[in-house]
Image (cartoon, helix red, strand yellow):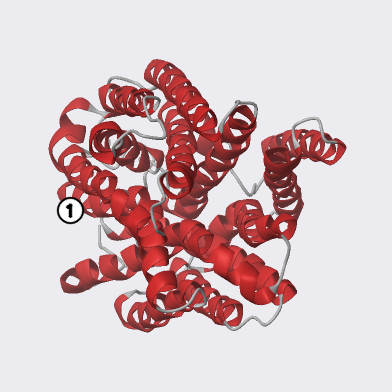
Amino acid sequence: MQSPVPHDRRWLALVVIGIAQLMVVLDVTIVNIALPSAQRELGFSSDDRQWVITAYALAFGSLLLLGGRIADLFGRKWTFIAGLLGFAAASAVGGAADSFGVLVAARATQGAFAALLAPAALSLLTTTFTDPAERGKAFAIYAAIAGMGGAIGLLLGGALTEFLDWRWCLFVSVVFAVPAALAALRLLRHVPTPNRARLDVRGAVTASAGLFALVFGLSRAETDGWGDPTTVTALIAAAVLLTGFVLLQARTAQPLLPLRVVTDRDRGASFLAIGTASAGMFAVLLFLTFYLQVTKGFSALETGLAFLPMSFSIAPTVGVVTTKLLHRTGPRPLVPAGMLTGALGMLLLTRIGPDTAYATHVLPSLILIGIGFGLTLAPSFVTATHGVPVHDSGIASAMVSTSQQIGGSIGTALLSTLAAAAATPVDGYTTAFTWAAVILAGGAVVCGSLLRSSTRPETSHGPGAEPVAA
């Protein structure tokens, strides 16, 4: 079994893949910091401001499954490079935007190319590192980036906005993407797909429309409430379209998403764990940012620095889990333990108040949450792609990113609604943290019951896994 990357260069390829993943993840939060400055300069309303965020989420979330299957059918290398260059071009246009419309269009285009890039990056990692020990180290790095990216985005966005200009929160993606694309041309090999299947057009249209309606409905619920007619219509349409998509996939000879990818108990539990952890992550990044900036008066840069302990907790936890624990215990004890640790950190955050100190009431929580997310995400990322045939690795990787996106959207919409009903802003934050803890604890129970105790992702490539072509 050979790697699609020459032996002496696959670790360099991991650097390129890691840069791409970091760019996609941090872009979710880095623009948040820039929004107030962009609003003042371009003159758009506070009601319109959400569309700078929503446009990215809609395009990214709705096109992920299609992007994953494109990588499987047409080659991961070229899909990856196209995603990088397209993302860079859209970022350059967004950074130079002279109107609200251009900025929103650029953000939507960023999301579309991110939907190509994210699944291709993870599937390249899966097919490049086939040795169990090396694969564990590679996934440790990837999962750490996924867990830390949001907090890094806040820090980088704060620094760029404070010392340069809000436009650099978009231009910085060009600095990441173009060198990564040039390096990918040399470091990655195109692996032809023999007997290439036809693209499931009906499935692609149905899935994309259903996911678009779901993300749009959740975004509307966050801003306009769950009873808003547009919200209700969008969510009903999403339910109908996604149900139809599942029925189509069961009857299609060459489906966009083979149901075997999601019906496996371990993979299904891993997708659920990633989605649940993402809901919790969004709660921390959103509501704790509001608390630190609005209630405590932190600057954008100070807020980014305040999240660093969470990032520093995630990274070593992921390393220990993927290289020392996962091959011995499997994911079953690790994932629930991580969710419960994260839930404890959330509960501790409910102690915050207008006059409480960061060191005593925020810092311990962030460390616990970081450890919890590391314990959850590391085994989930590995297990989600464990045993998947090479020709399905792109779509399995797309499901990982879809779980992150949908989980984050559901968490943001639900927790924002609950927080809005509170008497004061601080009460709203503590309400959100309480319910985030409940969500994580519930996820621990469900995922713990689904994961098999016999699963050991690091010890083999799993039944049904196919060799990687040179």
Residue 174 x/y as whole percent: 45, 80
Tell me the residue at 56%/81% (across/down): 89
Residue 73 in view here: no
Quarter of the figure with residue 52: bottom right
Identify the residue at image location x=25%, y=28%: 330
> Which amino acid type is marked by label 1?
Glu
Q: Is residue 463 above or below residue 69?
A: above
Q: Image check: 210 left or right of 343? A: right
Can you give x and y, in whole percent of width and height, for residue 157 in the image? 42, 65
Horizontally, is 247 left or right of 257 in the view?
A: right
Residue plotted at (24% across, 54% down)? 138
Q: Quadrant of the C terminus?
A: bottom left
Task: Determine the residue positioned at 32% across, 42% down.
Answer: 382
Q: Nearer the viewer, residue 467 or 101?
A: 101
- On the question of residue 464 being in view, the answer is yes
Quadrant (top left/top right/bottom left/bottom right) for the N terminus: bottom left
- Helix, strand or loop under label 1: helix
Q: Residue furthest front?
A: 355
**Mark 1 burial class by Cα count in 10 Å: few <14, some 14-19, many 20+:** some
Q: Is residue 379 left or right of residue 217?
A: left
Nearer to us in this view, 416 or 196 = 416
User: Number of callouts in the render?
Assistant: 1
Q: Which residue is mark 1?
A: 134
The foreground one among 202 and 137 is: 137
Instruction: Give the image location of residue 274, x and y in percent.
Output: 43, 37
Q: Position of residue 404 (x, y in %)?
A: 49, 44
